[in-house]
Image: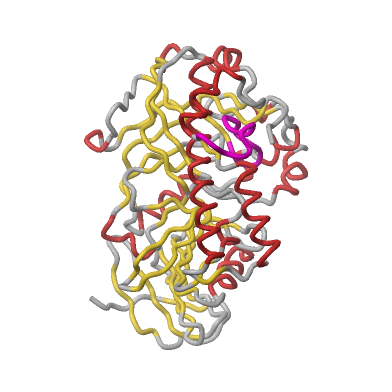
Amino acid sequence: MPFQAACTVSDGLPLLNISMIQRCQRSYVLSVYGGQRRLVLCLCSSTISRKHLNMGNLITIIKNSNTWIEGNAVQQLETTAKLPHIRRAAGMPDLHAGRGYPIGAAFFSVSHFYPALIGNDIGCGMAFWQTDLPAHKSKNTKLAKQLGSIDAPLDGNWDARISELLPQTAHRAALGTIGGGNHFAELQAVDTVYAPELLPEHFNAKCLQLLVHSGSRGLGQAVLRAHVDRFGHAGLPENTPEAAEYLAQHAAALDFARANRRLIAGRMLARWNAEGACLLDVHHNFLQSVRLDGEAGWLHRKGATPSDCGLVLIPGSRGDYSYLVRPMAENAAQSLFSLAHGAGRKWQRGECKGRLSHKYSADSLRQTAFGSMVVCEDKALIFEEAPQAYKKIDDVIAAMLDAGLIELVARMKPVLTYKTAGGCAD
């Protein structure tokens, strides 16, 4: 039912043509019709939406009063939403600026899709495993020593398993390796269980969990590079040979990414002489054919966790909590059936060392406030991936709770995080 809310406009212009304000579960969803650069803020709201009348698209940002989103990220979201064929755009509370296109966002288009919006890490995602490593007996220093380096390609002992998962594939040497940037694998311990009845089968709070964040490695990069070399950033009309070719390559990259996460988990468990079961494996960089409001089209997710595939894991920085959550189907449409995929960057990579090196040494950043350990022998990366460079995961989670998008199931804390022991496979 419509109701009144206190609102302001960020550029000082009067509020124009408010056509609908309706109550969400615990927040206000404000749809505003007006000028292109008028960021309308609902002072009691957790969600911002606005529609550009001349472009015919709706932009939504999931946020609350504690959500910090840099202006450049919002600008990228708006600019991308103006691309031809884009109908709707949604920014998650972890929204941050990427290389031309925002990260932590979803876009719905019709009759046309844009591979560049998915980016070069097609199929990047999170796999969450239950291990049989007892939490109360586990020491991170011992676990790190047993693990050693997993940067090199898998040896011949893994050939049968690789062939089972991917009978034929390029970039085989990258399988089972994490990669650089924000990718990681992390042993976690249960901190809090909020909804025991929603925990997945085989979940065991007395043992450690393993979270693997990685994607399609060099394969996805090769797919995007080949596309951009031929077509630039213009995208592809659906139902064309070129679109079918990309979709086939995209599907292969998704398979590669999922297999890669399974192989990473497998080689880590083998080093610890442990057993494990995969509880969930969810991509957050991918293209999906969907129907939205009765219209067939394409949903692009870039750093956006799907909310239509069951339980999902949303990690914080390497010195913060991770949350297992249940998406709320009744409110999913407002965020294009997507959720945050993590905490989201606060600082650009190039500025991290300058901000932190006068306070912290590289060695000090390998220990976190939780007492957990970070394996990262790349001295630039240890600063770029410091917890301080990311938003607080509790703020990201709170914004989605306020918008009625999720229900908390459990919270995990880090024990041992693996980034790199000194070198990455290509």
Question: 187 or 28: which is nearer to us?
Answer: 187
Q: Is residue 214 above or below residue 160?
A: below
| Point 66% across, 51% down: residue | 347
Tell me which residue sits at (53%, 45%) in the image: 124
Quarter of the rendering containing residue 218:
top right
- The relative height of residue 185 versus residue 140 in the rendered view (above or below) is below
Residue 337 counted in the magenta span: no
Quadrant, the C terminus = top right
The colour scheme of the drawn protein is secondary structure
Q: Quadrant of the N terminus?
A: bottom left
Give the x, y percent position of residue 392: 52, 45
- The part of the image, by quadrant, that contains residue 150 is top right
The answer, for residue 338, to whether it is visible in the render is yes
The one nearer the camera, 313 or 12, is 313
Is 176 in the magenta? yes
Number of marks drawn: 0
Magenta region:
167-183
Left or right of residue 195: residue 128: right
| Residue 68 appears in the picture as rendered | no
Q: Which SS type dominates the magenta stretch?
A: loop
- At x 55% / y 57%, what residue is drawn? 118
Horizontal arrangement in the rendering, residue 230 relative to residue 190 (left or right):
right
Toward which corner of the image does residue 394 lie, by quadrant? top left
Q: Where is residue 168 in the image (x, y as percent from the top left)?
A: 54, 37
In-front residue for pair 366/236: 236
Q: Where is residue 356 in the image (x, y as percent from the top left)?
A: 72, 40
